Image (cartoon, helix red, strand yellow):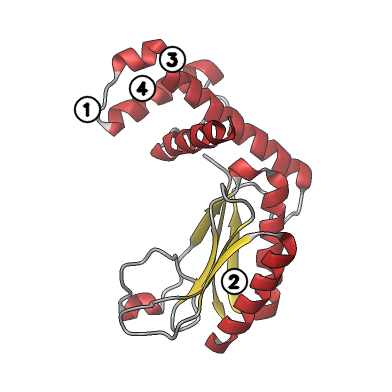
Amino acid sequence: MAITIQYRGKLRNVNLINTLVAEVRDICKANQWLFDAQLRPFHTTFPLLRGVSLRMDKDMSSLDLYFNKNGILFPSLVPFLTEEQHNKMVFVSSTTQFLGFEAHIKAINLLTYLDKKYFQTFELRDSGGYYPTLNREALKEEFAKSEKIILLIKEIIESHSFQQEFNQATPPSVLISRLQKRVDKIIGTAQKVIVTTDHILDVMDYVRLINKKK
């Protein structure tokens, strides 16, 4: 699966949102990153969240820093929030696979900086293994390993023999099962890779980005 950062947390004070957004906006301008801020007052229906979203590149999954009325980080695409959800911390995620490990490190550095300055509680999960060890070589290896799997699954999906077996009506579970068998046959079961629908989505993202660069 593509390298992903997951994070959740709660601000020391909900009134820090404006200050955090202003600082992130300055950082984005200094680094020529894309950003979008939402600072309208909270309302019972809309807006449900306030904060900022940034991208180091237009092709990057956004790094969202949106907060609910209690100062808790929350995914940006939420139709509504129940009272229970307003008090529950959930993970927000961002995929860095297709920008490279340097962008991944910058994202981690930004989040850990904001954690120390603004958050009462903060948890960060890094599928690339860079955080908390800050081991660049380990991160490079994880990026290479993940890309290798994505390219392997892409090659299988695009193969003539595979496409002959499936069509749009094929159930996803059958597709995943057949993909798993082919992956196991190629790389063996010693370095077990569990194929999921996320791998297929990663391949689609990869192909989309390659086509855009042509």
Name the residue carrying label 4: 178
Which amino acid does the dot numbered 4 rest on?
A: Arg
> What element does badge 1 sit on?
loop
How dense is the environment of label 4, judged by Cα within 10 Å: few (below 14), some, or many (20 and up)? some
Name the residue carrying label 1: 169
| Of residues 12 and 65, the one drawn nearer to the viewer in this rendering | 65
The mark found on residue 159 in the picture is 3
| Of residues 82 and 181, the one drawn nearer to the viewer in this rendering | 82
How dense is the environment of label 3, judged by Cα within 10 Å: few (below 14), some, or many (20 and up)? few
Q: Determine whether, in the image, residue 66 is placed left or right of residue 137.
A: left
Name the residue carrying label 2: 122
How dense is the environment of label 1, judged by Cα within 10 Å: few (below 14), some, or many (20 and up)? few
Can residue 130 be seen? no
Horizontal and vertical percent position of residue 50? 48, 77
- Measure the alpha-carbon separation of dots 3 and 2: 44 Å
Q: State which tag comes first along the sequence, 2 or 4.
A: 2
- Measure the alpha-carbon separation of dots 4 and 3: 13 Å
Horizontal and vertical percent position of residue 162? 37, 16
